[in-house]
Image (cartoon, rainbow, N blue to C red):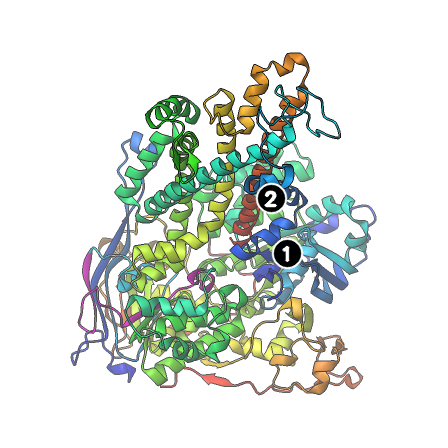
Amino acid sequence: MSDQRRISAASGAPLLRVRGVSVTYGVQRSIADILARRPGGAIVALDDVDLDVDAGEIVAVVGESGSGKTTLARVITGLIKAESGVVEVEGEGPNDWRSVGMVFQDPYETLDPKRTLGEFVAEGLEAQGLPMDRIDASLEAAELRPASAYRDRVPEELSGGQRQRAVIAGALALNPKLVIADEPVSMLDVSMRAQILALIERLRREQGIAWLFITHDLSLAWAISDRVVVLYLGAVLEEGTAEQVLRNPSHPYTRALLAALPSTDPRAAGTHSLAAGEIPQGAAPSGCRFRNRCAHAVEACASARPPLEAAPSGAAGHRVACFRAAELPAAASVARHAPGGATPSGGA
Amino acid sequence: MSGAANHNDARSLPAGANAAAPLLEIRALRVSFSLEDGRRLTAVDGINLSVSPGEAIGIAGESGSGKSTAASAIMGLLPPNGRIDSGSIRYRGLDLVAEGAPLRRTRWREIAVVFQGSLVALNPVIKVRDQVAEAIELRLGEPANAAREKAKRLLADVGIPDKRLEAYPHQLSGGQRQRAMLAVALSCSPAVLIGDEPTTALDVIVQAQILELLDRMRHEYGLGLILITHDLAVIADMCDRVAIMYGGRIVESGSVREVFTNPRHPYTQALLGAAPDARAGRRTIKVLEGQPPDLASLPPGCHFAPRCPLADARCTEEDPPTVSYEDRVTLACHRYEPNGGALPAPVAAPYPVLELGKR
Amino acid sequence: MSGNAKLSVGGRILNRVSGGNLLLLLLRRWDARVALAILTLLALSGIAPGLFVGPLQTATTAEAAPLLPPSGAHLFGTDDLGRDLLNLTVHGARISLVVGALSAVITLLLGGGIGMIAGYRGGRTDALLMRIADTFLILPTFVLALILAPILRELIGDQTEILGIRTTLLTIVAVIGVTSWSSTARIVRSQTLSLRERTFVERARLVGLSPMRIIARHIFPNIRTVLVANGIVVIAGSILTESTLSFIGLGDPFQPSWGTILGNAQSAAAPSLGAWWFIMAPGGAILFTVIACTIVGNAIDELLDRDVRVRR
């Protein structure tokens, strides 16, 4: 089924349609900069990003900090405006997005410490003029059962996992078709994570809710999503089904992410840093934005930005933005690396 | 570990220490906190742990497991309302609990720590090199010039390029700050290094770089490494032995290979199965119901019993004894009989399994 | 949850300050207990001074000899007209209380409201409101009061009463309120600025809650304790200002206030006569009240600070 989910789905509009979205943040100049008449810089947070999410689909946006993934979430929910590009939900522009919910990373911050869970869920209902009798149903849909036991509690009395359920209940109250979840489990204990993943999966199955699951954790993306989009410095480097992107990665960056992932499985043990350095904090390099960390970069990578094109795998929907994707060795040989920690570091 | 020039052997030990005694040995350590309402809460409940030079021990657990409190106790960094009730922490035979204040110096010289948030651990208004040099000057009493030279070498060793020596902490990236913290920690040539979630705030590629660095430093300096993390995969990658904590107790410990391939304690099984694994291509996850334990009101008997699918009446009444099997694995679980010390076969706990990715 | 202790990630023991248990937390500190006891006594004296010392003594009802040192009959001694100083000091509490409370209310309403709006709206509104606040911030309260008090008294007449409070007092209250709101506004604004960035406010915006509702629901309840701490400090300041004005004769001549008594002591040449108790009674009352206010304000601040520090 996911194979038919092409980026430019010919039949029928997707639930969420993002086209050519760009966001630039101005950099504040210090007094020294102003005195020296240095121009204020600008950081491109998102650069010409396309993204589709179909009804009932779970799409993972994977990226490190600084990749622009949180900016993308905020653009889609309308918290910030894109400079250019289109964001549509069910074919409509901003201003009428009751159908989009949002779950934030930090459940400790999302709930007002002074207000009860019932008041929290009621907030959205009240603002949208919906009936208050949905409070209990929403809490129970998020597996806070019985609702009467949770309605009057304040966040302080709840565990992190219960708080995140409450946040999800707040989103469910508005009957969303799509929920944007920005690192929804990264602050939770491992055992709580499994519970929340189970809840997300169940809500998709039973209520047909689509999720845009933003995460830095490839394993989570692998487990929960139908499709994976890899974001780096504001641009999509690779996308496709979870199998295509994470079992057969084509972009050197995706491969580096996967190789760096530690695993408890003895057969997969041993991490390796294939990429040097860290994600740049300032402006992205010219041409391919990953080239200054890439072991395979050649001159051509500096001159032009590689377009997002069909991956060498040839699988439908698998696309990669790399000039050298076709020349790289098969992914399987990269993902495996002999254990043993004494390998010298790749550098700083 | 392979006879890399071990700087610890060459150095004089603090008074009262014995070179033949184990590097760091923790016996029956109990730590409690006083609450504002007058109650006391036991955060660490009788743990045993030892580290040898060049060995890496992982301590894993969720919030409320007591793993960070254990680290604070070893470092002597308990908050004012916390205290060590009983047990011993011996460095080369020297009891750090009993000796008290005079040993602060020993502690800081011999046992170093790297925390998670390195932006707070570094002074924002002092250049990185000066912070490392300052640590060397203060703790080893070396003259300023020599300290600055040594700081430069150390920073180069952890991968801070020369041109960043004069940078302030906020000018460094997250990974570089963690490298600088490691340089500060190594500045006094410690024998034991404690990493308290040292890579949790970092991105996965940078985490791999820092883990590689930590591993190299451990082998080069023959450090005893204690790695405290919630991420079992990091422990699998880095450590020789592992201790799994729950509700202030070690429920299972042993070699990483044995514990991770044949997890016996139901909690270890849950923890290992709870996270999906993209490297291994595993999507199924075990769902552990219930909430993490509240240390202020722990259940009687086995603390894990309320969440354990194998629990019976005995588990909710009696504390499970910690039994050592063939000197390879310790277990605190009523499901396993002492057996004369022979390693028992694992009993799989029937957790609900969530099959993700099946559409 | 019993008590207010919680265990967080990393094993730190947390104490969270929420409105209800603020008083309980304060009562755990001995200094705050003493200070709160003093303030309670002050409040009771202000509300019902007759209960403690009977009706206010005047020059006509005074029965003792002038300038008697403290004794069993007159614990604080008597003044130059033979009035009991304990009687005068307890009755004087009412003025301090009224001035302190009203000034704090005005300050908190103006400063809190403007601070929250400036902090939440940001941009030009913020810039404009803060420039106005800065202008008031540099106005010297005392000099302004010195100039305004006689003018207003002349304009309204010092016998007029509004809601049972004489206009002279209202003048003092107005002057204190007008000059002290700006520092409150600055504090509230900075708190609001940081609250605005919190996820729960962002989320409220996202679901479509109006700015006024966000301020009422999320901003105000979270800065309430800050306002209380600030209000108490304002009370201390206004009691001092009122005492100073009354001391130099700009207060209400018909109501004894601590400042007025001090002024009387000055004009009766009490210091040179060696009548130390004449100064001691009102002076001590001012000192203890202001110190008590400061202790409570600081204690609340410290509790809040710990709350913030622990949560980060």
Q: Is residue C118 left or right of residue A113?
A: left
Magenta residues span A84-112
Task: List x then y, in percent, for residue A287.
Answer: 25, 55
> In the rendered structure, does residue A165 fall within the stretch colored magenta?
no
Task: List x then y, in percent, for residue A66.
Answer: 36, 56
The chain under label 2 reads C
Q: Is residue C238 left or right of residue B8?
A: left
Quadrant of the rendered structure where residue C283 is?
A: top right
Task: List x then y, in percent, for residue C70.
Answer: 72, 25
In the rendered image, which quarter contains the N terminus of chain A?
Answer: bottom left
- The residue under the point 64% across, 43% down is C37
Q: Is residue B181 above or below residue B280?
A: above
Residue B150 is at least partly visible in this image: no
Q: Is residue B294 left or right of residue A310?
A: right
Q: Are marks 2 and 1 on the same chain?
A: no
Task: List x then y, in percent, for residue A103.
Answer: 38, 67
Could you say which disc has been placed on residue A72 in the image?
Answer: none
**Residue on which disc 2 sits:** C40
Quadrant of the rendered structure where residue C284 is?
A: top right
Kind of residue at disc 1: Ile
At mark 1, the secondary structure is strand
- The residue under the point 51% across, 41% down is C232
**Residue on which disc 1 sits:** B194
